[in-house]
Amino acid sequence: MSSSNTISHEIAGTLRDEILRQRYRSGDRFPSERDLAARFDASRGAVREALSQLEQLGLIRTQPGGARVQSVNAASLAVLGPLLALNDHPDPLLVDQFLLTFSVLAALTAKSAVNAASPEQLIQLKKLVAELAGQADDFEAMQPHWRELLEAMSAIADNLVVRLISNDLKAQFVGQMMKLGIRPELKKGSRDRLLTTLRVSLNKRDGEIAGQAMQDHFEEFREAVGEALRFRADKSLNSVVN
Amino acid sequence: MSSSNTISHEIAGTLRDEILRQRYRSGDRFPSERDLAARFDASRGAVREALSQLEQLGLIRTQPGGARVQSVNAASLAVLGPLLALNDHPDPLLVDQFLLTFSVLAALTAKSAVNAASPEQLIQLKKLVAELAGQADDFEAMQPHWRELLEAMSAIADNLVVRLISNDLKAQFVGQMMKLGIRPELKKGSRDRLLTTLRVSLNKRDGEIAGQAMQDHFEEFREAVGEALRFRADKSLNSVVN
DNA sequence: AGGACCAAATTGGTCGGACCAAATATAAGC
DNA sequence: GCTTATATTTGGTCCGACCAATTTGGTCCT
């Protein structure tokens, strides 16, 4: 599934999912490279590269004498994507935590951006907000503009740490949501309120306001996504029953 | 330096630092595996495992035909540690961004924890805060208790996303700070204020207050660390001159 | 029976050479 | 100059082998 077309990636993906599904208890010995090579009918080299990936993910720790499984809680951020993709329907709780985390980081970015923006950058941001307001009706159409605004803020805020985290989160999350075609329905006034508040923030050059606006907006978005997921779960339940 | 004692890790570390030092421009072709094997006087297998690690870090992207260097901005969170360790003195700006990010995540954790805590967990948190208050004078002595409190909050908040991010962040950051022996000096009342506010938050069961307290405290911590780093930079400058 | 100690089997780390398919660079043809 | 066909480079995989560290199992001593 979530693997390139190389054998080592395939092996890594399979083993990764097995670990994420708790098929090995934390601390357990992991099968030896030779055993795995036999199981996957691959060379030891290919297995080794797969294990190297698992080690980078923080899922196993290898030592001469044997590899051991580590707790998922101690893994790297990069396991979140596979974790979301583990089942047909992403774990709603995990999605919720995802968006909650997104929201505080987006808020931080917006706050920093507004506070640090040069006059030209302020104008740029205002322009982007205006463009966004232009097509506040069409969810699909505003998507690129929305992303552009976030990207601009991220560039202005210039916080590498947040940027790297967001890279990982977006890469793992957005892809999943897109693949599933989740289309959250925001309440009518939500977007307008956000845009209005952002405009105020930009005019007053007050990052605090922008951050709060972001957080509030994401809060509503979070609820909308949760609703969409619940709906989806119901529907699929029905289709299973039928 | 920042590598295990295996050859492949050593190669990976060297190449990683070279990329982080911008010795290759983003998009550049990366040397071929055979060339690298010759350069490091190692087998191609070892080089391959090293490259596999770099790929996991998001620093290169390999394809049949050649590997290419990627932008550091598109890398994974795990590059932050090496990035901090690149020079003798960590980049103060980066450290600042680190702590800024820490603060919002810690605030989120504290807020969620207080709001979600069961009665027993509330008692536990109160106890930990009390213990912390007991030795508010000794920076070293309170360190374990401080960590214990954060850990407890993290467990109660039970947000896997934040936890994974914090894992990475802590693993990369705390280690560096410890190694350098950075000892930020907080203002006198800072700790007391935090503890008092936390107590209030716990009594009123109001997570918002706890989150705000965390954020404020980290803000002061951030300034203190910045101060310590500047002091350190000066001192080292003198020692170089002498 | 229990514990300390030593030898054998297992396991990860590395090496060298080999082959394939995809991508690139090079030469040929128009 | 541009396209096309060919040769070369490069990553992906496999095999067989060796070393050093760990683990395991048994032996010996108390």
Image (cartoon, coloured by chain):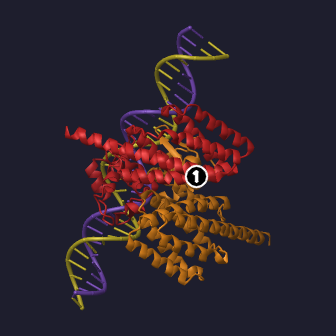
Chain colours: A orange, B red, C yellow, D purple
In the image, what residue occupies the spot 57% across and 53% down? B162
> Residue A234 lies in what quarter of the image?
bottom right
The answer to whether residue B111 is above or below residue D25 is: below
- Tell which of B192 and B171 is nearer to you: B192
In the rendered view of the protein, which quadrant contains the C terminus of chain B? top left
Please name the amino acid that badge 1 sits on. Gln
> Residue B134 lies in what quarter of the image?
top right
* Residue A129 in picture, x, y percent from top left: 50, 77
> Residue B89 lies in what quarter of the image?
top left
- Mark 1 belongs to chain: B
* Residue B225 in picture, x, y percent from top left: 42, 45
- Tell which of B15 and A125 is nearer to you: A125
The answer to whether residue A95 is above or below residue B5 is: below
Q: Mark 1 points at which residue?
A: B212
Q: Is mark 1 on a helix, strand or loop?
A: helix
Can residue A26 be seen in this snapshot?
no
Pick out the residue farthest to the right: A242
Labels in figure, total = 1
- Tell which of A143 and C30 is nearer to you: A143
Q: In this view, does B79 lie to the left or right of A194?
A: left
Q: In this view, does A225 lie to the left or right of B215?
A: right
In the image, what residue occupies the spot 38% across and 53% down? B93
Can residue A179 be seen in this snapshot?
yes
In the image, what residue occupies the spot 46% across and 38% down? A64
* Residue A73 in picture, x, y percent from top left: 58, 48
Mark 1, residues whose alpha carbon is within 10 Å: few (<14), some, or many (≥20)? many
In the rendered view of the protein, which quadrant contains the N terminus of chain B? top left
* Residue A41 in picture, x, y percent from top left: 52, 55
